Image: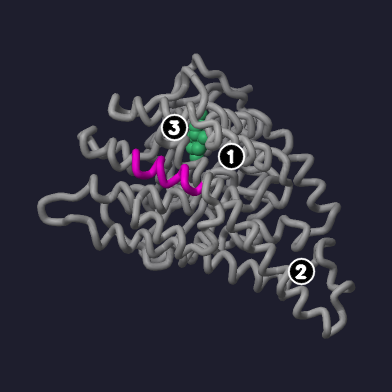
């Protein structure tokens, strides 16, 4: 049966898996185990043996960041491993290798990424990753294209739709902590200093803003476009200078592609806006901020280019069927429809970026980008800028037609 693993029981668990025992080498007593989970939900163990290392992730029956007062079903580990299995072949090299799922423990074993660190942490520390925006754009394009009605058949997509629709506990968490709580009176909301009381009050009184967020909440729940990661922020990406891996797809379900794209865009923009808060006497962080913001068009342009290229080369779904556009005279119309399709994803992404930013400032789960700025007098104005920019994303969507529009608005914020 289920029991939360600890540094002893994780050894026996791995010792009972011949392939993992062989990978680690030596005897379990000689393995080192560290519990390193710093996310909101789960346990994460890094296990090193003389011959190799693995990472074990396990669900807890509650929200780790809140404690046992917020119970949460264990099955998120099942959906996370299901996502890796569904998209693994399409995102090879861009996600950790998956080794084993243990159903009764709601735990799985995967590649231990080393010397990778969490992208968000690297950006906060002032590091740059020359390939990361292209890699995450590639990941988003490949994973969503392959599981959409462009890259998969009706039957394949129906399987994912039905299977991942059961990820209700995490879909509900997103619906509540991302879409509904932050602009409602909710005991789960928090903000980091009284300087933000007025902003929170104004936003809760802003009917137009609430209407726009609610529209995106509806679209989040009802737009079954592709199997999406569901939580594609900079804390879900591990990096070195040359390598990028997207992890933590436990919130996955068949939803809107723009939700993944918007999550990554929002987190780049939040990191950009937070950079002055990390300035030191020797480094004003302006160059780092510029670099981070430059990744916005790199990410979107890669996503778009790769999605369109896959549409050209690998279409096997039932939408926009090739048989219908077989005539050379149809090519221009099809190309225009593809452009318009990507424009709609971009518009969705801008809206979801707005929603995802507001929740990080007024909702339950915050970003280290801002939280690591210790002085509220420095932090609150930066959080306020981010929240106001997010409001513009939601209320002036027609001002954002290209990633350069996002860059310009972030600079002017
Ligand atoms: C209660 S969980 C809050 C957040 O943690 C995860 O990282 C997701 O972003 C979720 O919304
Ligand atoms: Mg996560």
Which type of secondary structure does the marked residue at label 3 adopt?
loop
| Quadrant into which the N terminus falls | top right
Q: Residue furthest top?
A: 69
Instruction: Tell me: 76 left or right of 47.
Output: right
Q: Could you tell me how far apart the alpha carbons at marks 3 and 1 are, in whole angstroms?
A: 21 Å
Does any atom of ligand 1 lie closer than 8 Å to the CB of label 3? yes
Q: Give the residues in magenta.
A: 384-393
Circle 3 or circle 1, nearest the eye: 1
Percent across and percent down for residue 283 are: 16, 56
- For the residue pair 80 and 191, the one nearer the viewer reads as 191
- Residue at screen point 57% across, 37% down: 213
Would residue 385 be counted in the magenta stretch? yes
- For the residue pair 253 and 73, the one nearer the viewer reads as 253
Task: Return the residue at label 1.
Answer: 212
Would residue 232 be counted in the magenta stretch? no
- Residue at screen point 38% across, 47% down: 270
**Image height of 288 relative to 203, above or below:** below
Task: Return the residue at label 3.
Answer: 365
Q: Residues within 10 Å of mark 1 (few under 14, many from 20)?
A: some
Instruction: Tell me: 214 left or right of 201.
Output: right
Percent across and percent down for residue 257 are: 64, 52
Which type of secondary structure does the marked residue at label 2 adopt?
loop
Task: Return the residue at label 2.
Answer: 315
Q: Residues within 10 Å of mark 2 (few under 14, many from 20)?
A: many
Percent across and percent down for residue 375 are: 20, 34
Percent across and percent down for residue 325 are: 85, 75
């Amino acid at each position: 049966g289920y029991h939360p693993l600890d540094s002893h029981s994780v050894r026996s668990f791995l010792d009972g898996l011949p392939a993992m025992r062989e990978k680690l080498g030596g005897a379990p007593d000689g393995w080192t185990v560290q519990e390193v989970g710093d996310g909101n939900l789960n346990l994460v163990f890094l296990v090193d043996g003389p011959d190799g290392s693995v990472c074990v992730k396990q669900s807890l029956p509650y929200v780790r960041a809140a404690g046992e007062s917020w119970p949460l079903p264990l099955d998120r580990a099942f959906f996370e491993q299901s996502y890796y299995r569904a998209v693994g072949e399409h995102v090879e090299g861009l996600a950790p290798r998956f080794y084993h799922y243990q159903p009764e423990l709601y735990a799985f074993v995967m590649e231990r990424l080393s010397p990778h660190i969490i992208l968000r942490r690297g950006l906060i520390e002032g590091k740059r990753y020359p390939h990361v925006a292209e890699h995450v754009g590639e990941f988003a394009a490949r994973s969503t294209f392959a599981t959409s009605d462009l890259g998969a058949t009706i039957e394949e997509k129906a399987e994912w739709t039905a299977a991942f629709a059961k990820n209700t506990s995490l879909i509900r968490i997103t619906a509540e902590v991302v879409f509904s709580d932050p602009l409602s009176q909710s005991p789960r909301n928090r903000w980091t200093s009284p300087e933000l009381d007025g902003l929170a009050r104004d936003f809760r009184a802003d009917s137009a803003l609430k209407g726009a967020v609610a529209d995106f909440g509806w679209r989040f729940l009802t737009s079954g476009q592709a199997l999406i990661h569901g939580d594609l922020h900079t804390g879900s990406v591990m990096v070195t200078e040359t390598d990028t891996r997207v992890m933590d797809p436990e919130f996955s379900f068949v939803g809107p592609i723009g939700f993944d794209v918007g999550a990554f865009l929002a987190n780049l923009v939040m990191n950009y806006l937070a950079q002055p808060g990390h300035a030191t006497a020797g480094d004003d962080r302006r160059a780092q901020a510029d670099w981070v913001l430059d990744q916005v068009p790199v990410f979107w342009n890669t996503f778009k280019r790769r999605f369109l290229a896959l549409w050209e080369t690998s279409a096997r779904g039932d939408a926009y069927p090739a048989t219908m556009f077989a005539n050379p005279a149809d090519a221009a119309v099809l190309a225009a429809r593809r452009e318009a399709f990507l424009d709609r994803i971009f518009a969705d992404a801008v809206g979801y970026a707005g929603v995802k930013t507001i929740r990080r400032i007024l909702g339950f789960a915050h970003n280290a980008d801002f939280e690591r700025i210790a002085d509220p007098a420095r932090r609150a104005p930066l959080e306020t800028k981010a929240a106001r920019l997010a409001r513009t994303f939601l209320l002036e969507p027609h001002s954002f037609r290209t990633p350069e529009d996002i860059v310009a608005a972030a600079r002017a914020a």
